[in-house]
Image: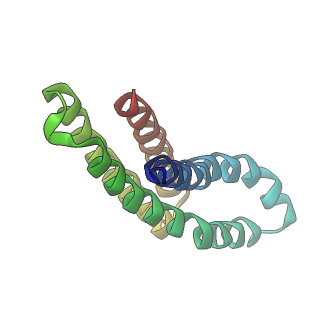
Amino acid sequence: MGSTAPAVDALRLSLHVLAAAVWVGGQFTLAGLVGTARQLGPGAPKALARAFARLSWPAYAVLVLTGLWNIQAAHPSTQSLLWRTLLGVKIGVVALAGLSAWLHSRAHRPAGLAVWGGVSALTSVSALVLGVVLAG
């Protein structure tokens, strides 16, 4: 009987990539829809953001959980100091991405929405790139 390891690896990585597509891709998709949403009425952007939050926060949770699973599967103690350092940076960036997205969701003024939305997008993309580098 064959090993199930390749199937488990495929499941882990697929869940992680799918969650990243929702979290990161969804932020950029939503940003692109804001102008059109404003044309639908003053409450439309906020309603769209609430609907996205129902998808994005579970995706963020899946990213964190599968990220921890990815770390375990990579056997960090066998990795180089550079790899472990980048992993620490990525963990910080992921935390900042979540915090900035949460602050964006709590902002009421246009400047706060813009700043925290920008920080959230930048840190989310940075976490994605660091993940690709670590998977290298």
Q: Height in image: 75 above or below 30?
A: above
Q: Height in image: 88 above or below 45?
A: above
Name the residue: 41% across, 43% down: 123
Q: To which quarter of the image does residue 77 belong? A: top left
User: Residue 33, how many percent across, how many down?
Assistant: 76, 52
- On screen, residue 85 versus residue 119, left or right, reads left
Considering every residue shown, the one lying at the far front of the view is: 1
Question: Is residue 5 in view?
Answer: yes
Instruction: Give whichever of 9, 45 is nearer the camera.
Output: 9
Question: Is residue 108 in view?
Answer: no
- On screen, residue 114 versus residue 49, left or right, reads left
Q: Height in image: 77 above or below 111?
A: above
Name the residue: 31% across, 56% down: 68
- Quarter of the rendering occupied by the C terminus: top left
Instruction: Give whichever of 59, 54 is nearer the camera.
Output: 59
User: Residue 117, how many percent across, how many down?
Assistant: 51, 51
